[in-house]
Amino acid sequence: MPQDDASHSVHGKVVVGGDLSGQVGVGSHITQQQLQGAPASITAEDRAALEDALAELRGLVGDQTDDSVRAAAEERVDELSQTLLDDATPDLGTLEYVRGWLLRHVRPAGEAVNRLLLSPLVGKLVGAGGDALVAEFQRRFGV
């Protein structure tokens, strides 16, 4: 006697491991959809907010840094500004370097740069670079 499809069950074992990503469907009559839109673009308001955050960081560098380190700290903020505002996609090496340098030499500014790098604004910039850039950003910054 034939079994009704609704009463049919699937038995088995599925093991997923390693460095994998994507969808997995297990069972009978599985339907999956994956929608992917264009990466979010940065608006004029986003750019203005990013410029404000960088100005705040510059202010912290000026206020919290002694004269012997101030010029170098300002150069690091300039590098950060350039990659966030002028490059097509942020250079993750620059983000990582500037973050580490500020954390070592100007601790209050280092904490501010952490807030900036983990902000939705920077997330949009990184996201515009595609999935590979997002994955590398997440690996480097632990998000």
Image (cartoon, rainbow, N blue to C red):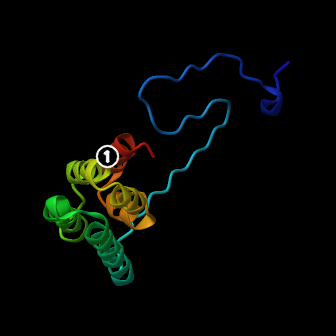
How packed mark 1 is, by other alpha carbons closer than 10 Å (few <14, some 14-19, many 20 or more), is: few
Image coordinates of residue 48 in percent, x first then y, are 34, 82
18 left or right of 4 in image:
left
Q: Is residue 2 above or below residue 93?
A: above
Residue 40 on image: x %, y %: 39, 68
Residue occupying image coordinates x 23% and y 71%: 85
| Residue name at image x 82 percent, y 29 percent | 4
Amino acid identity at mark 1: Ala
The answer to whether residue 23 is visible is: yes
- Foreground pick, 128 / 123: 123
Where residue 26 sits, quadrant-wise, is top right
- Picture layout, residue 111 above or below residue 48: above
Q: Is residue 38 visible?
A: no
Residue in view at x 26 percent, y 52 percent: 105
What residue does disc 1 label?
132
User: Which of 43 and 118 lies nearest the eye of the viewer?
Assistant: 118
In front of the other: 109 or 5? 109
Query: Which quarter of the picture shows residue 32?
Result: top right
Quadrant of res 38: bottom left
Q: Is residue 143 left or right of residue 6?
A: left
Q: Could you say which is closer to the camera, residue 79 or residue 32? A: 79
